[in-house]
Image (cartoon, helix red, strand yellow):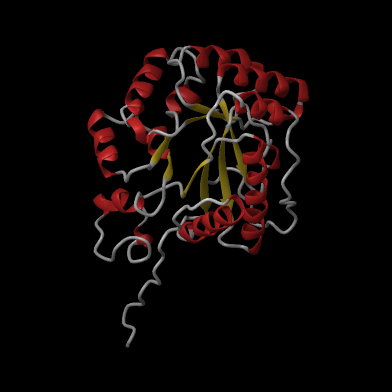
Amino acid sequence: MDFGKLEDISGVNFSLPTDHPFMSKALNSFEASTPKSNLCFVGPPIWSNKEWVGKIYPTTAKEKDFLYHYTRQFNTIELNVTHYQIPSEATIQRWREAASPGFRFCPKWPQEISHERQLRGCEALSHAFTNSVLGLGEHLGTTFLQLAPYFDSRQLRTLEAFLKQLPPGFPIAVEFRHPDWFSNPSVWQETLLMLHQMGVGTVMSDVAGRRDVLHMSLTTPTVVLRFVGNELHPTDFTRVNAWANRLKNWYLQGLQTAYIFVHCGENINAPELTKYWIEQLNQQCYFALSPPRIQPKAVQGTLF
């Protein structure tokens, strides 16, 4: 994930902001009517990484089987491939059959809808996408709509009209990137209220170069967090510690589900950072999530 990445993070304040005041309103309004579930899904953003062969995949693993092995190590994935192409029925079936019990795919909306058409005149495409990913059945987590960086707050009504044409109850969270959404508190408040009334979630990104997108605002009892590490820099681990503590508080306030996608540079070290995330969540939030089983990669030519 290149968005917001910095080469030099020495001057970054990684402290978590305080919760937005809307947070308690959103969580309290759902707490009474929604059965408490306390679900948590954590995983890297890709499954196709040859560097993971012999590390979290068997040494004999073929690329066509990477997804199968991935779902035996993690319980969710940020599904970026759908950003570039709406998957066919055959592809959906293949993904569903490869997934382990309880695994959740979280597909990103196609860029043709979000970036090229900017949510206008795309009803047929939206229908095709929602119909496709609903085929994942119990393996569908939430979808996330990443708005284009040039889609600003003046287009709030366009976003509202787009969301209204989706199937009732379709799982979706919106990622805002243009700074205007966050620079005007009244506009952001209006946006949060609109999403809350429609049962639409928000996406947060914790990334060094854009601290404004870490808006700490929930509109549903589900949080979608894109956490961008810095190749196992010491701050990666202190940030995870702070997040685990914050999530513990949110669960106590009524949070139901968390989707956490762990980015880490080229993602070679994403399994290690994800493992640390899971260990801290288990410790602080009293989960029993299974951490990935990481094997030290054998060095070719080593004598034993």
* Near-viewer residue (200 or 282): 282
Q: Quadrant location of residue 73?
A: bottom left
Q: Which residue is drawn at 37% across and 24% down?
A: 129
> What is the quadrant of the C terminus in the image?
bottom left
* 304 lies left or right of 158: left
Residue 111: x %, y % from top left: 45, 29
Q: How many labels does the image show?
A: 0
Image location of residue 39, percent across then percent down: 50, 41
- Determine if residue 155 is in view: no
Q: Up-down: is 38 above or below 245? A: above
Residue 265 lies, with reference to residue 92, above or below; the image says below
In this orientation, which residue lies closer to the viewer: 211 or 241?
241
Instruction: Say which of 38 and 106 sits in front.
Output: 38
Residue drawn at (68%, 56%) of the image = 9
Q: Please state the horizontal and vertical placement of residue 52, each as a whole percent of the image.
A: 37, 61
Whether residue 131 is visible = yes
Q: Quadrant of residue 214?
A: top right
Q: Is residue 98 above or below residue 126?
A: below
Q: Which x, y percent locates residue 64? A: 24, 50
The extreme bottom residue here reads 304
Question: Which residue is located at x 52 percent, y 54 percent?
Answer: 278
Q: Is residue 110 left or right of residue 34?
A: left
**Residue placed most toward the observer, 139 or 9:** 139
Residue 121 vertical position relative to residue 276 in the rendered view, above or below? above
- Horizontally, residue 280 falls left or right of residue 294, namely right
Residue drawn 60% across and 35% down? 255
